[in-house]
Image (cartoon, rainbow, N blue to C red):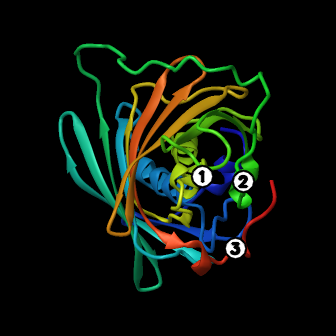
Amino acid sequence: MSWLLDERTELESIGDGRYRREIDDGEFWGTGSPFGGYLMALTFAAMRAEVADDTRVPRIYSHQFLRRVPVGPLDIVVTSERIGALVHSVTARLVVGDDTVGVAGGMFTGDRDGPEYLDEPLPEVAPPTEVGGTEVPGWATNVHARFTPHRRFGHDGPVVPNEDGGWLIVNEPGDWDHRLALMASDVWPPPVIRHPDRMCATPSLHHVVHFGPDVGGTAGQALLVRHRATGGHVGLTDEDITLWADDGRLLLKARQLRTVIDLSRLDTSSFVTP
């Protein structure tokens, strides 16, 4: 990577698996807290630094968002739970002062022989170079300015079925890896916010990702993301997320659990106009 995310995921190693980053309210700020995808990318960077083995490929990443993360120092404490012949399993705690504000887990594995197949290929949609229709979601925070979206799923206004997404063009040049994929899996506004009679804000509670075998690429590649809200109950919503590279690779499959907040309770002061 040679762009802003590379710089913003640099960490100070304090020792004993503890990494530190000074959080600001700049480019990767969300709604009253750092953007969730950025916190995942930052925590992933700490995990990868602790694993420190290029032969172990990231396969699974999960993140529980426990509290808002304020501006200031954030510590990420990584523990290797088990280092086996195939799997290196790690956990991480995100700590502000004496408070744990998030917990995460990851698995890094070696390669072995097995079947190779892709049952969910890149959908047949208009290419990212074809501009038309609704090109920008209805609102954005600082982090959304890092991407240019071109909608290919769902439509403007109320969404039925509850699906949304499209091409994401990264507005900074540079190669990319799992950190950007984590960001891209979370940056598109969730379709449930435009479900008929269900207009709401939906902060993340839990985000779990299964990576494909080959995650990474070069400057200029577009990413295609599809979000499908699968249900809502007891003040929560479930959402399935799929992310492809424009060359057809399946980069990740994710599932996200969100809580529902009525728009009347939402502080929109941190929103910016795309």
> Foreground: 35 or 164?
164
Question: Are the residues at dot 3 and dot 2 in contact (C-beta closer than 8 Å)?
Answer: no
Residue furthest out toward the bottom:
98
The residue lying at 55 percent from left, 66 percent from top is 201
Q: Mark 2 sits on what residue? A: 138
The residue lying at 76 percent from left, 33 percent from top is 133
Say left or right for 37 vs 258: right
Q: Where is residue 196 in the image (x, y as percent from the top left)?
A: 54, 55
Question: Are the residues at dot 2 and dot 1 in contact (C-beta closer than 8 Å)?
Answer: yes
Q: Mark 3 sits on what residue? A: 268
Q: Mark 1 sits on what residue? A: 189
Disc 3 packing (10 Å; few <14; some 14–19; many ≥20) = few
Q: Position of residue 120 (x, y in %)?
A: 40, 21
The residue lying at 39 percent from left, 26 percent from top is 213
Q: Quadrant of the N terminus?
A: top right
Comparing labels 2 and 1, the label whose residue is closer to the camera: 2
Comparing labels 3 and 2, the label whose residue is closer to the camera: 2
Answer with mark 3 or mark 2, whichever residue precedes in sequence: 2
Q: Position of residue 2 (x, y in %)?
A: 71, 39
Residue furthest out toward the front:
197
Q: Which amino acid does label 2 sit on?
A: Gly
Say left or right for 270 vs 196: right
Give the CA separation, mark 3 to mark 2. 13 Å
> Foreground: 240 or 71?
240
Say left or right for 15 vs 135: left
125, above or below 31, in the image: above
Assign a secondary structure to mark 2.
Answer: loop
Give the CA separation, mark 3 to mark 1. 14 Å
221, above or below 12, in the image: above
Answer with mark 2 or mark 1, whichever residue precedes in sequence: 2
Q: Which amino acid does label 3 sit on?
A: Thr
- Dividing the picture into quadrants, the one containing residue 225 is top right
